[in-house]
Amino acid sequence: MGVRSVSELDLAGACSGTTTPSPAAWEDEVLYFLLLDRFARGVEEGYPTPPDLTPGELIPRFVAADAGNAVTDEESAARWREAGRGWVGGTLAGVRSKLGYLSRLGVTALWISPVLKQARTPQGWAANYHGYATQDFLSVDEHFGTAEDLRTLVREAHEHGLRVILDVVLNHAGDVFAYEEPSPRWDGSPRAVAGWLDGDRGLVPFTPEAAAAAWPDGAVFPSELHPPHTFTRRGAISDWDNHPEYLEGDFCALKDIDHGSGPVDAFRPSAALEALIRAYCWWIATADLDGFRVDTVKHMDPGAVRHLATVVHEFAQSIGKDRFYLIGEITGPREHAVHTMELTGLDAALGLADVQYQLEAAAKGWTDPARYFELFRNSALLGKDSHTWLRHTVVTTLNDHDMVRQGGDKARFCADPEGPALALAALTLNVLTLGIPCIYYGSEQCLDGRGGGAEADRYLREAMFGGEYGPFRSRGRHVFDEQHPVYRELAKVLALRGRERALRRGRQYLREISGDGRDFGFPTALGGDRVLSVVAWSRILADRELICAVNTDPAGSRAAWVTVDAGLHRLGDTLECLYRSDGGTSPSPPVVEGNGKAVRVELPPGGVAVYGPHSGAPGR
């Protein structure tokens, strides 16, 4: 039998082993976010697989001709679409089999979706494949593997030089009880509860005794969550911006947990919150985790978040993890995210919404690139002395598993025809600008997430290993292709980032450009046209300036004179081409007069280049 109460956890034993220290600086890391159910099974051809498998049991690699093989007629298309609504088979062991793939790409930290045991739905477990509907906070979901599988994954990840950040949920549990009124909406009043949902989705009394008897698949665990007052019981949120509705209401069918009460400086945590935090501290110690991504922070009382951050940071430091990282999903304006971080002690916020849109828009030339760079430059708005504060407090990403900013018509960056041609440029903007970059799984293979409609989220979550719900509307083919041009070139960009500290920690400036070497300005859309141009920026650390440039034109080569720091370069000096995406040799551009000082950059369609001083030259 498994553990049912946090009081049964051997926390002292879990803390007795050796632990992996935290990284020196999280801005040095490159995150990779994967949905466990949709990433890998460990039976993909060309990668480590169980020794007893025959070749016929392995999943072959995808080739272009496989695109659309699952939607050749309406019956097969309906089968493919339906498969995307439920579990498709990714596991912790599958992630282990791809640690080489990930480390060769150049990522340094894995952000893994929640692994804990999920609540059943009226359709069984199908709809909760994502992991955000926890029924048992003390057990790993059997679909993913076991607690030992999690420990083994983290240990082997560390051996590959990869950190592991686990997605955790405290705001709510899964759909673990039923109201007397069908699907009530929040109106500020408590709602009557009909009973706990047990393992076969029947009802048992809403009492601690009945909950304990519903083990292992019914009610909720640990047992510290059994008292009825654990839950706010006020129905589902309708207005996601109405206070206190978004704090007290259920997250759709997921049941809101009461974390306590009081002002932030005198918050009184509930027994339920204390139990959840203790459970998650046990996971830190027993699995040697390096950080948490905290789900739905907006829907938690700030006092509860501060209590979480304080206890977790202190616990992690007590076992040698001095910079255990807490990344909060904080929706809303950037000013709100900054305020929430500083009020609660979270280390970083996800840069969703504005950052995602402006990053995509800059890469595709939809808007002036200054709009993206100004998100980091406007330090006065954030109350900061320097924009470099953002280098380790915001996690930036191009795609994700929700794409909330897109409303109902959701898709990945590569869904439109020009997306694949500009994917490397977009990912380079992501990983070589300020912030802790995060790559959403499959972006390096140009997964498109195309589908849209009322249940568009499923299309953002293709299974890289193929199975019944493979990418590009395929079935039975995996896309772990290390020869894919975007994977191959992104790996080179990330290797350069790893070598050059300025690309990880330096100040950042969007640079003015010129077509004739005389008239300079920032790339700008004129008359509603797209910005098809060289977009260049500097990263400067101490006296070393690196010039990064991308071409937002997917079809044509572009050239421009790019402004450089006049105090760091001498006229006639040349800059070394540190990376060029077409693999060609690039002449070392000389520093000339122009807007102070400038160098000329030429890029192929959708191309990328990085320039820096020669070794031993001024600026080194």
Image: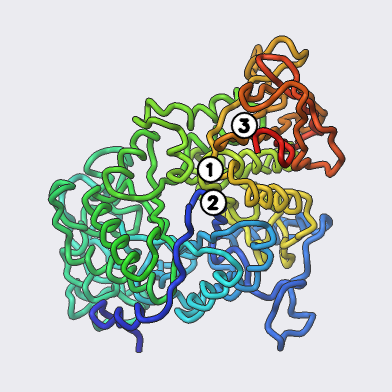
Coordinates of residue 453 in the picture (x, y in percent): 56, 45
Q: Is residue 584 left or right of residue 97?
A: right
**Vertical order, 460 against 102 (above or below):** above
Q: Which residue is mark 3?
A: 538
Instruction: Identify the residue at image location x=38%, y=73%.
Output: 285
Q: Nearer the viewer, residue 527 or 57?
A: 527
Q: Counting other residues with Cα less than 10 Å from the Cα at mark 1, is it few (<14), some (14-19), or many (20 or more)?
A: many
- The answer to whether the residues at label 2 and label 3 have Cβ atoms under 8 Å apart is no
Q: Which residue is mark 1?
A: 505
Real-space CA distance between mark 1 and mark 2, rounded to the nearest whole angstrom: 8 Å
Taking the image as drawn, is residue 253 in sight? yes
Q: Quadrant of residue 340?
A: top left
Q: Earlier in the sequence, mark 2 or mark 3?
A: 2
**Colouring mode (rainbow / by chain / secondary structure / one colour):** rainbow
Q: Which residue is mark 2?
A: 28
Instruction: Identify the residue at image location x=58%, y=60%.
Output: 84
Amino acid type, mark 1: Arg
Q: Counting other residues with Cα less than 10 Å from the Cα at mark 2, is it few (<14), some (14-19), or many (20 or more)?
A: many
Q: Nearer the viewer, residue 262 or 412?
A: 262
User: Mark 2 falls on what kind of element?
Assistant: helix
Q: Quadrant of residue 614?
A: top right
User: Mark 1 falls on what kind of element?
Assistant: helix
- The answer to whether the residues at label 1 and label 2 have Cβ atoms under 8 Å apart is yes
